[in-house]
Image (cartoon, helix red, strand yellow):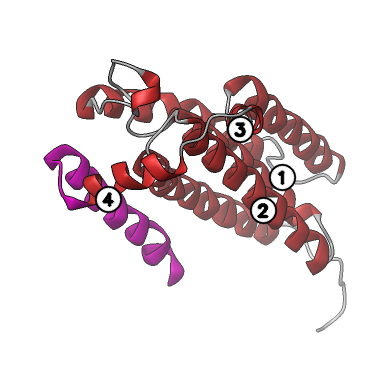
Amino acid sequence: MPRAPLMFGLPALCFTLVTWQVVAGGPLVRLDERLSGTLVHPDRFSELFADLGSVQVAVPLLALALVLVARRNRATGLDRWWLPPAAAAVLMLLVPAVVVPLKELVARPGPPVMGPGTGFYPSGHTATAFVAYGAATLLLLPLLRTAGARGALLCVCAALNACVAFGLVRRGYHWPLDVVASWCLCAMLLSCLWLFLSRSTRRSSARTPSLRTGPS
């Protein structure tokens, strides 16, 4: 797949650059702090948007998508119907295993409204939302028959993640770069899931016997 290196490599490069700037306290961090000072304005809406990235909201929605896809795959007789939902579930479980050590390693303080403390980089809420909504979208896309429906689903996924990012920054829970880093990190994770699902679908299709009995 010619797009695979770009899908994984570009987010990896961006994540490495942002992390280096955060650890070194480079000019990008100073710009980040000035931008945060301009954007922070805590209110009820920003808090509600930020909550869309919480485990209590995002993970149950992913679980619902896993159940729907598993039932649909099983009903259609798909070979190894359980594999795509299982892969998405495993990816969701990997999020804290990847994000928490990075938080401890970088130990970035939060915006002033959060008071003392470290562990804000990368954003856990952003990562949870990006993987939960992104994985659900990847699973549901093959079930939609029209381009319009698939486009609408992609728009909903993008809107949910944009709302989470806006809420976290506007409320002052995270610096903008905390959010950007999580997007880059989770784009790599979702790229792996997309590659896995694509190959799994091709193998299942190859094993499906043809219905034609005569010469082609």
Q: Is residue 120 left or right of residue 90?
A: left
Mark 2 vs 3: CB contact within 8 A: no
- The residue identified by callout 3 is 86
Q: Residue furthest top?
A: 116
Residue designated by label 4: 31
Q: Earlier in the sequence, mark 2 or mark 1?
A: 1
Which-is-in-front pick, marks 2 and 4?
A: 4
> Looking at the image, is mark 1 or mark 4 earlier in the sequence?
4
Q: Nearer the viewer, residue 69 or 183?
A: 183
Quadrant where the C terminus is found in the figure: bottom right
**Residue closer to the observer: 145 or 23:** 23
* N-terminal-most mark, 3 or 1: 1
Q: Earlier in the sequence, mark 4 or mark 3?
A: 4
Q: Is residue 157 left or right of residue 121?
A: right
Q: Which of the two residues, 175 or 9, is positioned nearer the viewer here?
A: 175
The picture places residue 145, in percent across and down from the top left corner, at 84, 62
Cα separation between marks 2 and 1: 6 Å
